[in-house]
Amino acid sequence: MIAYGGCTEPGGMEPADERWEASCPRCGEPAEHGRVERAEGSLNIYRTVACDHCGHHEGFDWLSP
């Protein structure tokens, strides 16, 4: 799906799916952070944190099917 502004149109841009490692806000250990764009009638941006060390999780669950 291609997003352009708030709509999905040909010739637009691919929604972002960025992931990186940074410290967990709860325990300070390395955690997976992310920024995901989804075209759901409009372009929605979700930010995530998932820590395997302490189980802290916040934001959109992009890892689930």
Image (cartoon, helix red, strand yellow):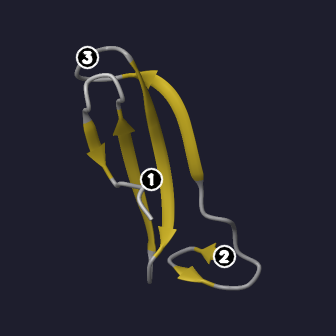
Q: Which residue is mark 3?
A: 27
Q: Position of residue 53 (x, y in %)?
A: 32, 22
Quarter containing the C terminus: bottom left
Q: Earlier in the sequence, mark 1 or mark 3?
A: 3
Residue 35 in the figure: left or right of residue 24: right
Mark-to-mark CA distance, 2 and 1: 21 Å
Q: Position of residue 42 (x, y in %)?
A: 44, 78
Type of the residue with mark 2: Ile
Q: Earlier in the sequence, mark 2 or mark 1?
A: 2
Secondary structure of the residue carrying tag 2 is loop
At 64% from the left and 77% from the top, the residue drawn is 1
Closest to the camera, between mark 3 and mark 2, is 3
Mark-to-mark CA distance, 1 and 3: 21 Å
Against 18, is 3 above or below?
A: below
Q: Nearer the viewer, residue 35 or 53?
A: 53
Q: Quadrant of residue 10?
A: bottom right
Q: Which residue is mark 2?
A: 2
Q: Quadrant of residue 27?
A: top left
Task: Using the image, tell me which numbered label, if any, was put on residue 63.
Answer: 1
Pointer 2 with pointer 1, Cβ within 8 A: no
Q: Nearer the viewer, residue 56 or 15?
A: 56
Q: Position of residue 23 (x, y in %)?
A: 39, 19
Secondary structure of the residue carrying tag 3 is loop
Against 39, is 44 above or below?
A: above
Type of the residue with mark 3: Cys
Type of the residue with mark 1: Leu
At 51% from the left and 26% from the top, the residue drawn is 21
Mark-to-mark CA distance, 3 and 2: 37 Å
**Residue occupying the far top of the picture:** 28
Closest to the camera, between mark 2 and mark 1, is 1
At 25% from the left and 33% from the top, the residue drawn is 56
